[in-house]
Amino acid sequence: MAFSINNSANTLHGILFVVLLATTATYLADFVICQQFAISPLIIGIGLGIIYGNSLGRDFPDKWQAGVIFSTKTILRVGIIFYGFRLTFQEVADVGVVGITYSLAIVGTTFILGYLVGTKLLKLDRDTSILISAGSSICGAAAVLATEPVLKAEPYKASIAVATVVVFGTIAMFLYPFLYQDGLLALSEQGMGVYLGGTLHEVAHVVGAGHVINADVANTAVIVKMLRVMLLAPFLVLLGVWLPSKVLQATGTKSLKKSNITIPWFAVGFIAMVAFNSLNLLSANVVNNINGLDTFALTMAMTALGMETRIEKFKGIGFKPVYLATILFFYLMLAGYALTILLV
């Protein structure tokens, strides 16, 4: 046990070390260049974790490892739950049927395409295909983080997925406003907001791209994006139910223990936090503080995930994850644009 009488001190030391790296990541995220490129502390955290884990981290005390694991598991799940304070049901209602239909279509088709192309065409392993597809279709690094414990995937696979989200999300953040301002996208301001929110990977990417155009576009984009974020919870529940059925198909076994079909409790907690936030019982200042603490918790989880990632495990994977992420990038760009023209 992480916090048993004999191990609690070592676990705490490991957690405090993760806190130190996460604090450094938070500090670096305030630099002007990071602000300009919408590089969040989560991304910096996993970068610092990978650098440390593959250098000085090789001498990291084994006794402290329980604290790192605690950060990648428990703190991660708590962070996903409180991510729900970034959304309300009122915001969902504001975007109406069009926004809901758009978000469902993008998330559903992008994930299915990614899974099929990854596993069938590119012959990638299941976990990497799902993680990249979840990150591309839902909400970037946060979706990868939330999906990883459901899959029980190896940390380096989540790191690969996060890397693709960062690269292609950043490209889109600069490319989309450029295409719009040059008149290459025949969309209204509302349409452009829906397009940005429905197709960009990270919330930070959506905010950055929207404000390059104007505040109205940014507001619409953020609401649509947060609707995609809200789909994270039902996605995780469906994934938890679907995975055992895939095991049945693969093994030919006629039955599985009921315990194998699990509903991720943190997904239910996420929806509960959205519901509570919708009641407006807390002041905006309190909610902002909760979101700030939540961002730090997720930064800790990303940092710990990076510390658990070893570069040697990437050998033999090749460029297939990049190919999958590229296909999904162009699918989001083209299918998202067509869907915007159709619905908005």
Image (cartoon, rainbow, N blue to C red):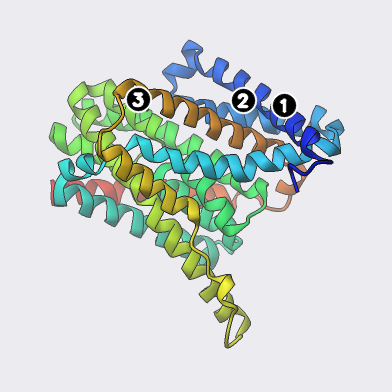
The kind of residue tagged 2 is: Ala
Asked if residue 29 is positioned above or below residue 187 in the image, the reply reads above
Q: Which residue is mark 1?
A: 17
Q: Quadrant of residue 58?
A: top right
Relative horizontal placement of residue 229, taking residue 65 as reference (left or right): left
The one nearer the camera, 30 or 62, is: 62
Q: Which residue is mark 2?
A: 22
Q: Residue at x 54, y 57 (%)?
A: 129
For label 2, the crowd category at 10 Å Cα-Cα, with few meaning under 14, some 14 to 19 and many 20 or more, is many
The one nearer the camera, 304 or 195, is: 304
Q: Which residue is mark 3?
A: 208
The one nearer the camera, 195 or 260, is: 260
Residue 282 in the image: state x and y as whole percent: 31, 29
Relative horizontal placement of residue 108, taking residue 114 as reference (left or right): left
Mark 1–mark 3 Cα distance, whole angstroms, equals 31 Å
Q: Quadrant of residue 200?
A: top left
The one nearer the camera, 308 or 80, is: 80
The kind of residue tagged 1 is: Phe
The kind of residue tagged 3 is: Gly
| Residue extending furthest toward the front | 5
Q: Residue at x 59, y 36 (%)?
A: 302
Residue 245 in the image: state x and y as whole percent: 51, 76
Mark 2–mark 1 Cα distance, whole angstroms, equals 9 Å
Q: Residue at x 48, y 31 (%)?
A: 294
For label 1, the crowd category at 10 Å Cα-Cα, with few meaning under 14, some 14 to 19 and many 20 or more, is some
* Mark 2: secondary structure: helix
Q: Visible in this render: residue 153?
A: yes
Q: Are marks 3 and 2 in contact (CB under 8 Å)?
A: no
* Mark 3: secondary structure: helix
